Image (tube, rainbow, N blue to C red):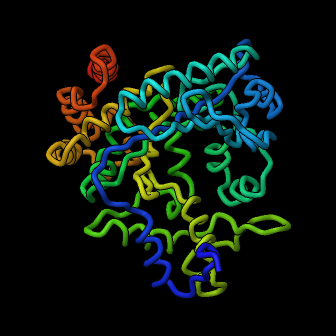
C-alpha cells in the first residue's frame, strides 16, 4: 500500500506523522520567495479581468488552473500560478543564497511584467486591491468550498489580497520563534494595504485584517513553546476542516468538524492529513521549511527589502537571539499591527529596533552593495514617514 493511503486511526498517530514532517533539521541555508500581485487593465484598473485574459497573456507560462495542461516555468525557474481572484503569483526556484535569489526572481519578474504588458495588463502594487471588490474568476471545488466556509472575509482574502511569502530552512526552534515574534513589527513596517475597493478601511494592513477575520483556528498564529513540532501538530488537530475532497459533488466539510474529530469519525489517510495541513494559514507555517506569510505584497522591486531584513536577522544564532530581543515589545500584537501599523507604540519600537539591527548586518545577506543601499533607503523612508507624521 502506498504510504499516502495509510489510514490514521488515532490522534497520536496523526501527531507522530505531522511532527515528523513539519520541521526538517540541518544547517539553514536555502531561501525562496513567492511574489503575488493583483492584476489590472492598464487603462482601467477598476475593470475586472477574466481567466481567459490572463491565460492568453501568459501563453505557455499559464498554470493548469487557467487551462494549460503543460505549464512552462519562467526562464529563471519560477513557476506561475493564479489565485481565485485573478492574482498572479510566481514561486521561485529554491536558492542557496539571497544574491542568487534576487537575480533570478528579478529576471523572472521582468519577464512576467513584459508578458502581461503586451496584453495591456499590469501588476498591482499593494497587499489588497484598492480598486475593486472581490470577484472569484476560478471555479474549483476547493475554492467554492473555501468561499462558503470562510464568509465575507474569506471572499476578500481569496479575491482581493496579495502577499509576499518568504521561505527559509527550518534550522533551530529559535528561528521559528524569531520569525513569529518579529511578525507584528514587520507587518506594520511593510504594510501598504489601507485602501480596498475604493474606500479607506482604516486598517494599516487590510490584507491582514481579512486573514484575522477568518476562522482563527485555521489562520491564527501557532502557539510558541518548547516543542514547535508538537504545537503545530496540536494546532492542526484542533483546526476545523476547510474542505473534504470528493470524486463527485461539493467539497464542503461538515460544519465544525476538526481533524481530531475526523480521525475519530472517519479515519482519514496520510494524504488527507497532508492536504488538511495545506489548508491551514497561520502567519508562519512549517512545511518542512518555514514559510513567512504575514507580509503585504510590495511595489515593483521593493520585495527585496523585507526579504533582506528577514535574511539578515536569521544570519546566525547570535543575530536570531538579538532579533528576538528587539522584537519583544511588539511580539504577539498581531491585531494592533494590522490595525494601527507603526502608530502602535510597542510595535513601532520593535520595528525600529529590528530595522536598525538588519541594516547593521545587511552585509551578511551577500547582496551587492547597490541593492543593500536600496534596502536601507526603503527602511529609512518607511520609518521616517512615521516619525514625520508623529
Percent coordinates x, y for residue 28 in the rendering: 30, 49
Numbered disc total: 0
Quarter of the rendering occupied by the N terminus: bottom right
Residue that extends furthest to the right in the rendered view of this protein: 248
Q: What residue do we see at 72% from left, 53% from top?
A: 143
Q: Nearer the viewer, residue 315 or 355?
A: 315
Which quadrant would residue 343 be assigned to in this image? Answer: top left
Above or below residue 344? Residue 214 is: below
Would you place residue 116 above or below residue 5 in this image? above
The residue depicted at 45 percent of the width and 69 percent of the height is 235
Quadrant (top left, top right, bottom left, bottom right) of the C terminus: top left
* Depth order, front residue of 44/274: 274
Q: Is residue 389 visible?
A: no
> Is 342 displayed left or right of 122 in the figure?
left
Instruction: Please report the residue visible at 56 percent of the width from the left and 25 percent of the height from the top.
Output: 108
Residue 129 point in image, percent of width and height: 62, 30
Query: Residue 45's quadrant in the figure?
Result: top right
Q: Residue at x 47, y 75 (%)?
A: 17
Whole-percent x, y for residue 150 in the image: 65, 56
Amino acid at each position: 500500500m502506498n504510504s499516502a493511503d495509510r489510514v490514521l486511526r488515532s490522534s497520536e498517530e496523526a501527531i507522530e506523522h505531522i511532527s515528523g514532517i513539519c520541521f526538517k533539521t540541518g544547517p539553514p541555508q536555502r531561501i525562496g520567495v513567492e511574489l503575488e500581485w493583483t492584476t489590472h487593465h492598464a487603462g482601467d484598473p477598476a475593470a475586472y479581468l477574466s481567466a481567459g485574459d490572463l491565460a492568453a497573456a501568459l501563453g505557455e507560462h499559464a498554470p493548469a488552473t487557467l487551462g494549460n495542461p503543460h505549464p512552462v516555468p519562467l526562464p529563471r525557474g519560477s513557476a506561475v500560478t493564479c489565485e481565485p481572484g485573478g492574482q498572479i503569483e510566481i514561486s521561485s526556484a529554491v536558492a542557496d543564497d539571497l544574491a542568487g535569489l534576487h537575480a533570478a526572481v528579478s529576471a523572472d519578474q521582468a519577464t512576467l511584467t513584459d508578458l502581461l504588458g503586451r496584453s495591456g495588463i499590469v501588476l498591482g502594487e499593494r497587499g489588497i486591491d484598492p480598486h475593486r471588490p472581490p470577484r472569484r474568476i476560478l471555479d474549483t471545488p476547493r475554492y467554492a468550498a473555501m468561499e462558503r466556509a470562510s464568509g465575507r472575509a474569506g471572499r476578500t482574502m481569496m479575491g482581493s489580497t496579495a502577499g509576499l511569502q518568504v521561505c527559509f530552512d527550518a534550522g533551530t526552534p529559535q528561528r521559528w520563534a524569531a520569525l513569529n515574534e518579529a511578525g507584528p513589527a514587520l507587518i506594520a513596517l511593510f504594510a501598504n494595504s489601507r485602501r480596498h475597493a475604493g474606500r479607506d478601511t482604516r486598517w494599516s494592513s487590510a490584507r491582514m485584517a481579512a486573514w484575522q477575520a477568518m476562522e482563527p483556528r485555521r489562520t491564527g498564529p501557532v502557539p510558541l513553546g518548547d516543542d514547535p513540532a508538537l504545537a503545530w501538530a496540536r494546532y492542526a488537530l484542533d483546526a476545523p476542516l476547510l474542505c473534504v475532497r470528493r470524486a463527485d459533488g461539493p467539497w464542503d466539510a461538515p460544519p465544525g468538524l476538526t481533524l481530531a474529530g475526523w480521525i475519530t469519525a472517519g479515519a482519514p489517510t496520510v494524504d488527507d492529513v497532508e492536504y488538511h495541513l495545506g489548508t491551514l494559514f497561520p502567519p508562519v507555517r512549517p512545511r518542512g521549511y518555514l514559510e513567512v506569510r504575514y507580509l503585504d505584497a510590495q511595489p515593483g522591486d521593493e520585495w527585496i527589502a523585507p526579504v533582506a531584513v528577514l535574511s539578515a536577522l536569521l544570519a546566525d544564532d547570535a543575530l536570531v537571539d538579538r532579533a528576538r530581543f528587539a522584537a519583544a515589545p511588539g511580539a504577539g500584537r498581531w491585531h494592533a499591527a494590522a490595525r494601527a501599523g507603526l502608530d502602535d507604540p510597542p510595535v513601532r519600537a520593535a520595528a525600529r529596533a529590528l530595522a536598525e539591527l538588519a541594516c547593521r548586518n545587511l552585509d551578511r545577506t551577500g547582496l551587492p552593495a547597490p541593492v543593500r543601499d536600496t534596502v536601507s533607503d526603503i527602511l529609512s523612508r518607511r520609518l521616517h514617514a512615521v516619525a514625520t507624521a508623529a
